[in-house]
């Protein structure tokens, strides 16, 4: 995976070793360790998405526990991709319609992995809905607007920004400026405009002298 270096000035602290009683962080680290072993590309992407999502949550002045939960959800948002064939996820050309259908299962697969742990109740819902679109044209359930949980709307923007600014086998990475224009163009369609504004403010702040 290419593109600009991870974090690009929007760093959140790496997930520090958790106290023994912080089971949510411990189990998240175990899941991310599994993800890293299965697919290092997705692990690195998820790490960047978690950092962007954390910064957006902070810009929106969510309470610190909420910021932390969104950070953990970012680490886990593509966990379901461990259930999709590696060759499908990383083929050198665009996936076929049948392969897209497999890839589109990953939010539900991630939700299914997490849903039976009450500690992951909120995070599993963010994972399930991180590909919903603000205008209702996303998946898996076609939720729209504020029907989509805020954490999932944040993950959607963070995820898309990282995807746009990262190289794919079948297309080059966008510059950060091109990606910012794309976020604005898709605000109200794919993205919650308030979430887009929050990320743009943070990016602007991080780039000022
Ligand atoms: Fe995803
Ligand atoms: Fe993703």
Image (cartoon, helix red, strand yellow):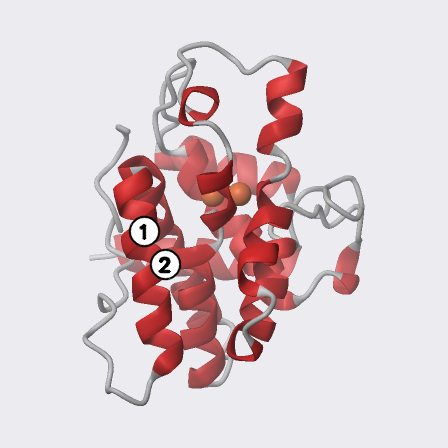
Q: Quadrant of residue 154?
A: bottom right
In the displayed structure, does residue 130 sit left or right of residue 138? left
Residue 51 in picture, x, y percent from top left: 34, 59
Q: Is residue 208 left or right of residue 189?
A: left
Give x and y (percent) for residue 64.
42, 84
Q: Secondary structure at mark 1?
A: helix
Q: Identify residue for label 1.
A: 34
- Nearer to me, 96 or 179: 96
Image quadrant containing the C terminus: bottom left
Is residue 112 positioned above or below 168 on the image? below
Q: Mark yes or no: residue 195 visible.
A: no
Establish if 188 lies above or below 58: above
Question: Against 2, is 57 above or below?
Answer: below
| C-beta proximity under 8 Å, tags 2 and 1 | yes
Residue at x-position 47% and y-position 27%: 85
Q: Secondary structure at mark 2?
A: helix
CA distance separating discs 2 and 1:
5 Å
Q: Is mark 2 within 8 Å of ligand 2?
A: no
Q: Which mark is residue 161?
A: none
Residue 62 horizontal/vertical position (percent): 51, 79
Q: Which residue appears at 52% of the width and 73% of the height?
A: 60
Residue plotted at (59% across, 47% down): 109
Residue 26, percent across and down? 31, 74
Above or below 158: residue 62: below
**Left-right relation of 146 to 117:** right
Which numbered dot is residue 31?
A: 2
Query: Residue at left 57%, top 42%?
Result: 106
Q: Residues within 10 Å of mark 2 (few under 14, many from 20)?
A: some
Q: Quick one: 59 or 47, which is closer to the camera?
A: 47
**Image quadrant in which the N terminus is located:** top left
Foreground: 94 or 24? 24
């Amino acid at each position: 995976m290419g593109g600009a270096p991870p974090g690009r000035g929007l760093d959140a602290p790496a997930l520090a070793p958790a106290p023994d009683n912080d089971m949510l962080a411990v189990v998240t680290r175990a899941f991310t360790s599994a993800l890293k072993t299965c697919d290092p590309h997705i692990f690195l992407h998820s790490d960047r998405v978690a950092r962007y999502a954390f910064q957006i949550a902070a810009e929106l002045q969510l309470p610190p526990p909420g910021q932390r939960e969104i950070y953990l959800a970012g680490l886990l948002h593509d966990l379901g991709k461990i259930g999709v064939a590696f060759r499908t996820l990383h083929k050198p050309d665009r996936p076929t319609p049948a392969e897209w259908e497999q890839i589109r299962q990953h939010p539900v697969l991630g939700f299914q992995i997490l849903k039976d742990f009450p500690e992951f109740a909120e995070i599993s819902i963010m994972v399930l809905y991180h590909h919903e679109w603000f205008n209702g044209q996303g998946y898996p359930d076609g939720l729209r607007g504020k029907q989509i949980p805020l954490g999932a709307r944040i993950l959607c923007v963070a995820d898309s920004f990282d995807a746009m600014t990262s190289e794919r086998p079948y297309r080059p990475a966008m510059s950060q400026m091109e990606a910012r224009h794309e976020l604005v163009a898709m605000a109200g369609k794919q993205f919650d405009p308030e979430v887009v504004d929050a990320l743009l403010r943070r990016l602007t702040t991080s780039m000022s002298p």
